[in-house]
Image (cartoon, helix red, strand yellow):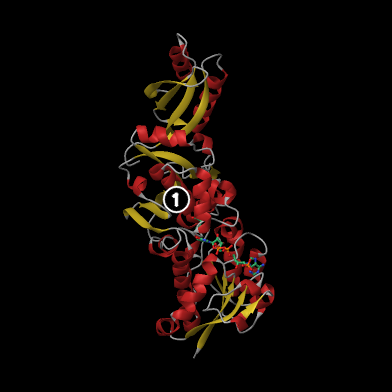
Amino acid sequence: MVDSIRVALLGAGTVGSQTARLIVEQADELERRVGARVELAGVAVLDPSQISDPWIDRALLTDQTLELTERDDVDIVVELIGGLEPARTFVLSALNHGASVVTANKALLAKHGPELYEAARKNGVDIYFEAAVGGAIPIVRPLRESMTGDRITRIMGIVNGTTNYILDEMTTKGLDFATVLKDAQAKGFAEADPTADIGGFDAAAKAAIMATLAFHRDVRMDDVHVEGIEHVTDSDIAAARAMNRVIKLLAVVEQDSENGAISAGVYPVMLPADHQLAKVSGSFNAVFVEGEASDDLMFYGRGAGGAPTASAVAGDIVTVARHRVAGTTGPDIPLYSQAPMADAADGESSYMLRLSVADNVGVLAKVSEIFANHGVSIRALQQLPDEDEQGNHELWITTHSVTDRVIRETAEDVAQAKDTSSVLSIMRVFEDAQ
Ligand SMILES: NC(=O)C1=CN([C@@H]2O[C@H](COP(=O)(O)OP(=O)(O)OC[C@H]3O[C@@H](n4cnc5c(N)ncnc54)[C@H](OP(=O)(O)O)[C@@H]3O)[C@@H](O)[C@H]2O)C=CC1
Ligand SMILES: N[C@@H](CC=O)C(=O)O
């Protein structure tokens, strides 16, 4: 008979603080759901003197994090510190000391996931991480459990709240990048180092985790092709708007039905304004999952922020606590697939290129010739009437489907062609409900 489940919380920042609040304020409810009292055994932070949350008992605070993970009276260690080290050491210590682990740390899982899953299996404990992808959205559990009888073919979505918030504010309010980033940081959406968000790495970590669960293959951060939003300018956003499109940072993972190769990428995409993902605003996330039998599923909700993320963490705590009470564990994460990873350069898409071209006779013919020489079919071409200070015009070219490799080679040739142009931006374009 288990009377209580004791939780060690590592980190009491944006997510940790809200997780502590849920555990403390909902203690009676959680006890009924779990069948044992869920109580905080300790809260580790770098500087306990800085913690003033009224729901955290000061007597529980410590800066001896490793010691807390080693204590015999701890059933669940909740890692909400972030980063690779010392988080990895703390998580391994907890697992090896017989505690189950709940974590929101996508960077850690995308780098060291299989080592941690194996440590959990070997020690007969759980590792749960619903909050690591999509904040409050239940997406990990559906991939890990609900859909495991199906064959998942593709996952596509918006999985970073910070970049979605930035792009949305720039698009709808005309605010500048730096101002909106500061706002996202103040709201607790951004990572400690926001280049993880802006550079697409946070979304890439989530893509690696989703691909691992969906395709039963060890897919790491390094397997994911990453482009962030750092090069997306006001002019790109204005161009998208003029073409009735919206720019979103998407994560796309899929398995080729013919050769089984898995591709995983994160990149900004111009979507038609009426695309379902184009309407995902602010820090919300949305993920489409295509299963062979299930057909299309869509998951939507708050992808970042303290309380929404704590909701997912608390859900995992309850699940893992129930397992401890029942003397069992949840399912392993079997990684048996040897499927190859596809080369990102072979990935196909339509593209839009913004060029700056001189106002000379024959320039359009020259640009078109370069595209034709690379076998790139032009779907639409538009020259803007306004001149810049050098007397150049913007030329917008949208292509038919072409590989990433070929569009980059084409752009290089365009950039080098004398007095034709410079390349202002290259962006993938998804037509319709692609
Ligand atoms: N913020 C969000 O919206 C989301 C975050 N996540 C993930 O959740 C995790 C936590 O993020 P977030 O709450 O935003 O991060 P914060 O930076 O707000 O909080 C980090 C906490 O960890 C503590 N800490 C740092 N190093 C140590 C250490 N060695 N020992 C003990 N405590 C330590 C910090 O202590 P101190 O305060 O003393 O510095 C702080 O309390 C990350 O993995 C993040 O990627 C996942 C989904 C959404
Ligand atoms: N920084 C992340 C937080 C949640 O995972 C984001 O912005 O999505």
**Image point 49% across, 59% down: which residue?**
187
Name the quadrant of the C terminus: top left
**Residue 397 at what x, y percent from top left?**
42, 25
Ligand 1 falls in which quarter? bottom right
As drawn, 289 above or below 81: above
As drawn, 424 above or below 73: above
Q: Is mark 1 within 8 Å of ligand 2?
A: yes
Q: Quadrant of residue 101?
A: bottom right
Is residue 224 or residue 49 the one in the foreground?
49
> Visible in this render: residue 187?
yes
**Amino acid, disc 1:** Tyr
**Residue 145 at what x, y percent from top left?**
42, 65
**Image point 53% across, 65% down: which residue?**
14
Q: Quadrant of residue 148?
A: bottom left
As drawn, 282 above or below 149: above
User: Disc 1 marks which residue?
Assistant: 165
**Residue 424 at what x, y percent from top left?**
51, 28
Tell me the SS state at disc 1. helix
Is residue 92 or residue 273 the one in the foreground?
273
**Image point 59% across, 59% down: which residue?**
108
**Residue 20 at what x, y percent from top left?**
52, 75
Q: Is residue 397 left or right of residue 420?
A: left
